[in-house]
Amino acid sequence: MHSHHADLVFTNGPVLTPGGPPNGATAVAVTGDRITAVDASAADDLTGPSTTVVDLDGRLLLPGFQDAHVHPAPAGLEMVQCDLTGAETRAQTLDAVAAYAAAHPERAWIAGGGWSMEAFEGGAPHRSDLDAVVADRPVYLPNRDHHGAWVNGRALELAGITRHTPDPADGRIERGPDGEPTGLLQEGAMGLVSRLVPEPSPSDLRAALLRAQEHLHSLGITAWQDALVGSFGGIPDPSAAYAELAREGALTARVVGALWWDRGRGAEQIPELVERRAALTHGRFRADAVKLMLDGIAETGTAAMLDPYLDGCGCATANRGTSFIDPELLPDHVTELDRLGFQTHFHALGDRAVRDALDAVEAARRANGPSPHRPHLAHLQVVHPDDVPRFAALEATANIQPLWAAHEPQMDELTIPFLGPERAGWQYPFGALHRSGAHLAAGSDWPVSSADPLEGVHVAVNRALPGSRGPAFLPEQRLDLVTAITAYTAGSARVNRLDETGALRPGALADLVVLDRDPFAGPVGAIHEARVARTYVGGGLVYAAPGE
């Protein structure tokens, strides 16, 4: 019998093995769900009559990409609701809202989202624009980064929001010169309207997750960490849908769920998180991380900064951003979560939030000793130079979203002027983190930005958006191609504690991607042109491009 023959053999192309650049002469054999050989002679020895042979024909084979910070449920819902992610101008955005409303007269609310701040003057659309296209029904549309929502007059009326409504503690109702609400709700103020939006049904959420999974597989993503498993800001809790799909075997990706830390509560929620971890973990879904959102975003002045933001004239303001979790209490929370075996996953955008997160990890290390739980800090827009070396020292992973590290209107018009030149130079310090010995993982924050890892790798290497002819953004913070791809593969696998994935080696799980070319063989300005031809999870084909 041919029991020693492989089920699947890849041959005739470059293979990215740990520490690459690619090896041009290697074949990879897969038996069952594991890699059984990475060896040029493997192809002939292990190929039998029932072996599927994939001729790479010079295309690159690499480990499956893993997204270390992503929101598939809201992304999938946006894909099946009023999806504004393709609109680039105010007119296109309003046309898309009008078209969706006309096509769905049965919907009591118009919901969806994904509009771009840069489509509107000052990043701020007005309720009157929405009123002009949908007057009869309430509209609730979060922006692309999900830190603000645009609503129409009907939604404000139903929520009882007037010029006299106070701002919630963790958010802001934007107001015009006359004091009237403009229809833009920042951060926690989103909840004033989102609580009225009808919850998606369990079948809606299930469909959204399956649609998102299909999209992520098409981009070569074989595993991810869902950065918000819980309810917040109108984002529905995907945990029941994940658990159901995992039990049925319909979850083909490997998924870690980061359970949402309720910012309005304290340590009393920890026993509930322990219960949720036990109840939800099944099959390919594991709910053993906790998401702690420490601050907001720089564009709205809610990212937590050590020094005040500047105003439009370059003068210091009184605003240092927002700390959503009391920095005095954070070290105790993180120490207890670490003791109980949870990974902590921080949203830390401003330099003060980054320092607070590192201080909390340091407190947990002091109290609990070395930890196998691999805490990670996501976003890292502004990092004080003194804090860069602390990542390696504390074994805290830098979870980078490379697509944001480029010149574009949101950066050049809504961020740099309000940070000032020194702090603007501390943004997204990927190169400095890598040189300091920090572990890098990578993610997209989709639907905030594209989920395509190849676009992220392109920006990490070029510090410019695909096709850009402008200057690179802080070019000294570039990563080389091997390092950038490693962050999206082995680096994110490490954060996801999927230690049998992320590298092509015998015995590893066969989570694999075939690209349509070898990006190492072309210019770095063309990395983004590569496409995924095939995606495998555990040796099973979960995506093939048309014609494959």
Image: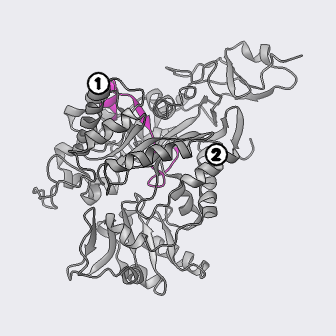
Q: Residue 233's quadrant in the figure? A: bottom left
Nearest the viewer among 296 and 87 is 296
Question: Which color mode does the image show?
Answer: one colour
Specify whether residue 354 is in view. no
- Residue at the spot of label 2: 246
* Residue at 21%, 80% in the rendered image: 179
Nearest the viewer among 508 and 323 is 323
For the residue carrying disc 2, how many other residues have a C-alpha within 10 Å: few (<14), some (14-19), or many (20+)? many
Q: How far from the left and from the top, in percent, is residue 314?
A: 12, 56
Nearest to N terminus: mark 1 or mark 2: 2
- Residue at the spot of label 1: 393
* Residue at 48%, 48% in the rendered image: 70
Nearest the viewer among 23 and 246 is 246
Amino acid type assigned to the residue bearing label 1 in the image: Ala
Stretch of the chain drawn in magenta: 430-452
Q: Residue 171's quadrant in the figure? A: bottom left
